Amino acid sequence: MTRVLENRYAIITGASMGLGFEIAKKYLEAGASLMICARNEMLLDRAAQALRALAGTGQSVLAMPADISKVGDVTALVGAALREFDHLDVLVNNAGVIGPCGAIESIDLNEWFRAIEINLLGAVLLSRAVLPRFKKAARGKIIQLSGGGATSPLPGLSAYAASKAAVIRFVETLAEETRPHHIDVNAIAPGALNTRMLDEFLAAGPERIGAAFYERSLRQQKDGGTPLGKAADLAVFLGSSLSDGITGKLISAVWDPWEALPSHLDDLNGTDIYTLRRIVPGDRGKAWGEGD
């Protein structure tokens, strides 16, 4: 996938560290110019300097501190990117938080609401901000980072799980809204990553996130987790023309044969493959519940 993002312009949120920073590096390697953002200005400046050292001729790396849950910050971020780049091709919604840990009746509700604001509403605000330009150009790519909470319950992490599940249905819905405009909207399941979030899970302890999830997190820390490059490579693919027509899908960076998906476009568009759906008894070999 060398230089598959040549002359493309992307916004990547939460790019000061971890997976966001890795995606930014891969985007530079693939030829893109970037606007990156994060809330911590010091970490963002450090990341921007490192990325600029990797940029090639004709590539730009812009950086702006931003809280993606605030309308004013999102408007300023997208506006600054458009003034510099003239157009946008890709939005990568990577920024996210784990939110409060613990039983729903014991956690701080303001922290719970805050996690929803960042993980779900941040994605909505950014997507809303770039869509007029994408529609005018009749093309564009919106890439949403998902998490384990999207596909399974996470006791003790209700805000994180609920926001990640909600954002997948937002991706599926937005994909259908924008399909006539040739805009592709997809989500990435990145795998079990050893990033700041894992440190926060471990710091919360088994009494707040449950013994099973805590033990799993300890094993992940010891084993090294999924390499960040797997999800970053998928983000490059989904931001490039290689993925044109693939939309409304939750794709696993670890388990799905995503490089081969262009050859299965009819199957993807004609079915609910790689989507979240309700399971009925017949799906599990049970005869009851199907009616007469």
Image: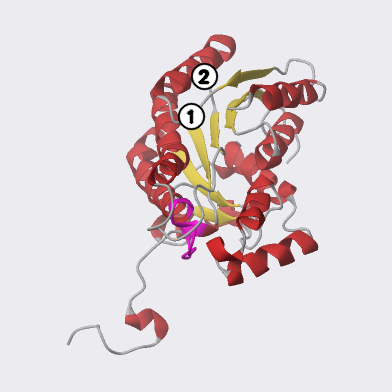
Crowding at dot 2, Cα within 10 Å, few <14 / some 14-19 / many 20+, comes out as many
Q: Quadrant of residue 45?
A: top right
Answer with left or right where residue 282 lies relative to residue 198.
left
Task: Give the percent coordinates (x, y) of residue 276.
Answer: 41, 60
Q: Secondary structure at mark 1?
A: loop
Residue 178 vertical placement versus 263 (above, below): above
Q: Residue at x 49, y 46 (%)?
A: 186
Q: What percent of the width, then of the height, locates residue 283?
A: 39, 79
The alpha-carbon separation of the residues under discs 2 and 1 comes to 9 Å
Could you tell me which residue is drawn at 44 percent across and 31 percent down? 69
- Rendered location of residue 236, percent (x, y): 65, 40
Is 156 magenta? The answer is yes
What range is drawn magenta here? 149-160
Q: Residue at the location (68% across, 25% down)?
A: 44
Please, what is the three-letter code of the amino acid marked with disc 2?
Answer: Leu
In the picture, measured across the screen, residue 187 lies left or right of residue 47, that is left
User: Which element is circle 2 on?
Assistant: helix
Which numbered dot is residue 77? 2
Q: Image quarter for residue 70?
A: top left
> Residue 108, image x and y in percent?
42, 47
Q: Earlier in the sequence, mark 2 or mark 1?
A: 1
- Do the residues bearing badges 2 and 1 touch, measured as CB atoms within 8 Å? yes
For the residue pair 220 and 212, the one nearer the viewer reads as 212
Q: Residue at label 1? A: 68
Q: Is residue 74 visible?
A: yes
Question: Is residue 204 covered in magenta?
Answer: no
